[in-house]
Image (tube, rainbow, N blue to C red):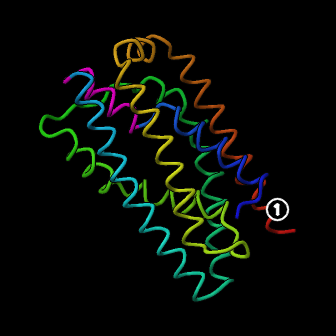
Amino acid sequence: MFDPTRFTLFLTAALLLAITPGPGILYVMARSLAGGRREGILSSFGTLLGGLVHVFAAAAGVSAILATSAIAFSVVKYAGAAYLVYLGVRMIATRKEAAQDVEAAAPTGNAFVQGIVTEVLNPKTAIFFLSFIPQFVDARAGSVFTQFVVLGVISVVLNTAADIVVAVFAGTIGRRLLSSVRARERQRAGTGAVMIGLGAYVAAADAN
């Protein structure tokens, strides 16, 4: 169903994004530090379900676009590739500010439910899936909906795995995140470079 080269690129990019400190990881870390390991893990599973909502919604939307027009689908892919480049540039440009901003508010209440709500109501998650996943979907290789869902689920599971690691080792990871600004800068810059390269590669490949 998937081209081996693109699938490898997808796994590499998805893994890098999963382990790069961002709002999701910082949210889980804050919940874990405030309420303990159990609360952090519940938050992780909440964001998992919230992410899956976005995956299925985006898969239905992309399938509908392809059913309407193959040209429109290509436009979505090129726009997504451009967005990945933009994300990469922004990650590099803001690496210092983002590396220093490692504190996240830890709201009180049901960690599982709040994890779901937090993720479902995050428009950036929806935009990301609509830009990232289509780059690895091949309309000629079978059901677009199925391909999108499989890739989306893999991405969400990788994110959740990283979140659970953070929840389990919140104390150690929290201290490292707080103490190593330079390491966070380098990781963010590296991930940004991968996003730029990925967007450019996919756009060039589709143009040929």
Left or right of 10 in this view: 123? left
Residue drawn at the location 69% of the way across and 75% of the way down: 139
Q: Nearer the viewer, residue 11 or 81?
A: 11
Where residue 82 appears, x then y in whole percent? 65, 59
Quadrant of the image occupied by residue 120: bottom left
Where residue 97 appears, x then y in whole percent? 47, 29
Task: Reply above or below: 57 against 160.
Answer: below
Quarter the N terminus occupies: bottom right
Q: Nearer the viewer, residue 122 or 37?
A: 37
Name the residue tied to disc 1.
205
Where residue 65 appears, x then y in whole percent? 55, 81
Residue drawn at the location 40% of the way across and 33% of the way down: 163
Furthest residue to the bottom? 68
Furthest residue to the left? 109
Left or right of 73 in this view: 152? left
Quadrant of the image occupied by residue 78: bottom right
Q: Nearer the viewer, residue 55 or 23?
A: 55
User: Looking at numbered disc 1 in the image, what kind of residue is underneath it?
Assistant: Ala
Residue 204 is covered by the magenta coloring: no
Residue drawn at the location 66% of the way across and 61% of the way down: 135
Per the rendered image, the range of residues in magenta is 23-35
Number of labelled discs? 1
Left or right of 32 in this view: 199? right
Task: Reply above or below: 163 against 68.
Answer: above
Dot 1 falls on a residue whose secondary structure is helix
